[in-house]
């Protein structure tokens, strides 16, 4: 412990900013209370099950199917958001048009709206007798009560993340870079692929990660539109709730711990990818 | 390549950035567009490059209409004030960009591109930076890379928008000399924009002085400095004392009266006399009406500068140290002698040439008007 403190003393650089000790102490305490202790309790709870018991829960076909649905739909939704969020951010930054502020405000709506409200609205729209659902039905496309519906709900929920992370970076990107590319003979596509996209890719990836993380954890909007068929359109958070309702607390914690590990691993990968990209730019 | 600019006009809303500008730039010339901010110089440069569109007028590149061409087909090299290097690309990729984005049929093989890039990097003396990123270079190095990038596409015209504006004074001076050498060895028709008169006079073959979207004067650095066509040009090209005078009977006197400061032929009435600080001499002793009082004395490098109050007009005077028999001190009474000056009458027909001030006494041989 003394050695740790000694080393702690060595990486603490002299600074004129006051309150480092207090600020760090507060941060650690706060994070512990809000994040670390609950998560540790979760892991401890799952550990009570024993390794074999844990494996049995984790490899249960219904659990595996739910994980596939949860992460699969979240991934697709995050990809959709990355593409269309980029387009929306582009339009908001680059063009001035009547109603731009209204569109700008609409982007934040999924942040503010209770997710259950979004779920009910989307279900009403996409149900076979809803406005859009009725149009898709003759084409053989069913959205509501299928994984497709989950994707729709998750895309809705994750939209602001990509837009709001890409927007400031796009604003900072000087028009001069594009002008330089044009004068050097590059067409629109090449300019976008070689000049603009690499510059905004780290931000885009952050937005993607946030949208993905949000989608994995989403519950409210999904349970209305998903239909919640076991093995088909049942998401992990719902499965946890079902286990809890059956008083299977150990099983619920085991699934939760697994979910925690998977989310953490994914975020770690994305973060590593980002820092690798930044190091390439020589920042 | 020859560039002909005919009656180029550009408006931004109600603001007229360029008002019927005509200019001819000869093959291999290095031309400076000089003016204060808002004079339209950068807009003109951007229109030549195709980054801005003109509302009216024509630009011919070697006799061929350039405005109809997309910027990417104009074969111009453009250097931005803030470099505009691609931050996520290495120096090598930055310079190679213009070659790599060519259509497949015109794209040189990889080895040729690499050879050409290293050649250019050697030309700007930065071959060792090929694998670095722009953020790892200093401002002067970045600007040289930007220049190498612009030269990679073998441009017919090189356009530079305040190329040294973001650099500190020392680097600026070095780069200026280096750019002049580079231009002399490559001979590409070049136009650069600057608001720094020293830069324009030192670097350019011809200087185009612009103000309020119009060209005030075009000429060699010597000509625009010695024979400015307007008060604006005189004022902009160097330090100037502006002395309000009344011309009567062929003599210019301070508006407040006193001994005349010189003779003027061909005008009577109120006028402004422009005098450079180094065209004024201060002689010891006062008396008469030409007496001035030294307010402040300070040395700037080789010159001694003094502020003199002369009957209510503050004059800035620059004296070589050897001209002072006795050192000047604040509070001294001195006789003011004007060696040379230009007279701009208050009321005169548009486009009329300024009149020369004919000095009277005390070293008057130094500068009798040359235009007369």
Image: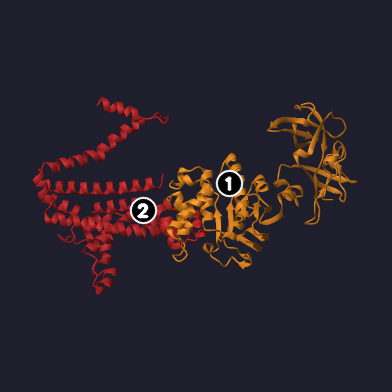
Chain colours: A red, B orange
Does A265 appear above or below A157? above
Horizontally, residue B202 falls left or right of residue B145, namely: right
The image quadrant of residue B63 is bottom right
Residue B39, position as x, y percentages in the image: 64, 53
Which residue is under mark 1?
Answer: B164
Under circle 2, the secondary element is helix
Residue B164, position as x, y percentages in the image: 58, 46
Mark 1, residues whose alpha carbon is within 10 Å: few (<14), some, or many (≥20)? many
Residue appearing at x 11%, y 54% in the figure: A60
Under circle 1, the secondary element is loop
Residue B218, position as x, y percentages in the image: 71, 55
Residue B135, position as x, y percentages in the image: 46, 45
**Residue A204, numbered circle:** 2
In the image, are marks 1 and 2 on the same chain? no
Residue appearing at x 34%, y 33% in the figure: A23
- Near-viewer residue (B185 or A103): B185
**Residue B35, numbered circle:** none
Check the residue under mark 1 and report the chain it is in: B
- Residue B84 visible in the snapshot: no
Residue appearing at x 60%, y 40% in the figure: B169
Q: Nearer the viewer, mark 1 or mark 2?
A: 1
Mark 2, residues whose alpha carbon is within 10 Å: few (<14), some, or many (≥20)? many
Q: What is the distance, in whole Å, between disc 1 and disc 2 at their CAs?
A: 34 Å
Looking at the image, do the residues carrying marks 1 and 2 touch, with CB atoms under 8 Å apart? no
In the rendered image, the quadrant that contains the N terminus of chain B is: bottom right
Residue appearing at x 71%, y 49% in the figure: B221
């Amino acid at each position: 412990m003394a050695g740790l403190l000694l080393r702690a003393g060595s990486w603490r650089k002299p600074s004129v900013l006051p309150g480092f000790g207090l600020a760090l102490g507060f941060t650690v305490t706060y994070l512990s209370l809000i994040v670390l202790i609950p998560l540790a309790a979760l892991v401890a709870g799952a550990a009570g099950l024993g390794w074999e018991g844990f494996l049995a829960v984790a490899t249960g076909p219904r659990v595996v199917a739910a994980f596939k649905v949860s992460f699969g739909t979240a991934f697709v939704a995050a990809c959709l958001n990355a593409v269309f969020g980029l387009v929306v951010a582009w339009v908001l930054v680059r063009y001035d048009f009547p109603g731009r502020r209204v569109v700008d405000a609409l982007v934040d709506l999924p942040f503010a709206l209770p997710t259950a409200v979004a779920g009910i609205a989307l279900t009403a729209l996409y149900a076979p007798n809803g406005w859009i659902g009725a149009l898709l039905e003759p084409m053989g496309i069913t959205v509501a009560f299928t994984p497709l519906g989950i994707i729709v709900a998750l895309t809705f929920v994750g939209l602001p993340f990509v837009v709001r992370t890409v927007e400031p970076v796009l604003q900072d990107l000087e028009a001069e870079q594009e002008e330089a590319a044009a004068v050097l003979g590059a067409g629109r596509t090449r300019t976008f692929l070689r000049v603009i996209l690499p510059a905004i890719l780290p931000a885009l990836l952050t937005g993607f990660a946030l949208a993905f993380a949000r989608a994995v954890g989403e519950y409210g909007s999904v349970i209305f539109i998903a239909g919640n068929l076991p093995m088909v359109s049942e998401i992990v958070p719902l499965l946890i709730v079902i286990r809890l309702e059956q008083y299977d607390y150990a099983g619920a914690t085991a699934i939760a711990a697994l979910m925690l590990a998977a989310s953490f691993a994914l975020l770690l990968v994305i973060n590593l990818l980002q820092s690798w990209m930044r190091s390439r730019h020589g920042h | 390549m020859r560039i002909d600019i005919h009656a180029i006009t550009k408006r931004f809303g109600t603001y007229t950035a360029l008002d019927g500008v005509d200019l001819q730039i000869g093959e291999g010339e290095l031309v400076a567009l000089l003016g204060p901010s808002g004079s339209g110089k950068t807009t003109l440069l951007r229109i030549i490059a195709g980054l801005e569109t003109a509302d009216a007028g024509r630009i011919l590149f070697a006799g061929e209409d350039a405005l109809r061409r997309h910027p990417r087909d104009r074969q111009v090299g453009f250097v931005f004030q803030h470099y505009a290097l691609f931050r996520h690309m290495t120096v090598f990729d930055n310079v190679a960009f213009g070659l790599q984005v060519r259509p497949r049929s015109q794209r040189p093989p990889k080895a040729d591109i690499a050879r050409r890039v290293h050649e250019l990097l050697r030309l700007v003396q930065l071959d060792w930076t090929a694998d670095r990123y722009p953020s790892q270079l200093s401002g002067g190095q970045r600007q040289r890379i930007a220049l190498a990038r612009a030269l990679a596409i073998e441009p017919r015209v090189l356009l530079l928008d305040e190329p040294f504006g973001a650099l500190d004074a020392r680097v600026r001076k070095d780069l200026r000399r280096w750019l002049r050498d580079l231009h002399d060895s490559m001979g590409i028709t070049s136009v650069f924009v600057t608001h720094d008169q020293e830069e324009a006079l030192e670097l350019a073959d011809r200087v185009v002085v612009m103000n309020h979207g119009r060209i005030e004067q075009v000429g060699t650095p010597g000509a625009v400095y010695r024979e400015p066509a307007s008060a604006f040009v005189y004022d902009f090209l160097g330090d100037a004392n502006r002395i309000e005078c009344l011309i009567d009977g062929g003599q210019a006197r301070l508006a407040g009266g006193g001994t005349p400061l010189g003779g003027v032929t061909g005008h009577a009435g109120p006028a402004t006399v422009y005098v450079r600080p180094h065209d004024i001499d201060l002689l010891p002793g006062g008396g008469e009406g030409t007496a001035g009082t030294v307010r402040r004395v300070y040395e700037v490098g080789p010159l001694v500068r003094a502020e003199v109050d002369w009957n209510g007009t503050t004059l800035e005077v620059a004296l070589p140290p050897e001209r002072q028999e006795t050192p000047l001190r604040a509070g001294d009474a001195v006789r003011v002698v004007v060696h040379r000056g230009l007279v701009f009458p208050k009321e005169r027909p548009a486009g009329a040439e300024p009149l020369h001030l004919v000095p009277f006494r005390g070293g008057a041989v130094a500068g009798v008007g040359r235009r007369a």
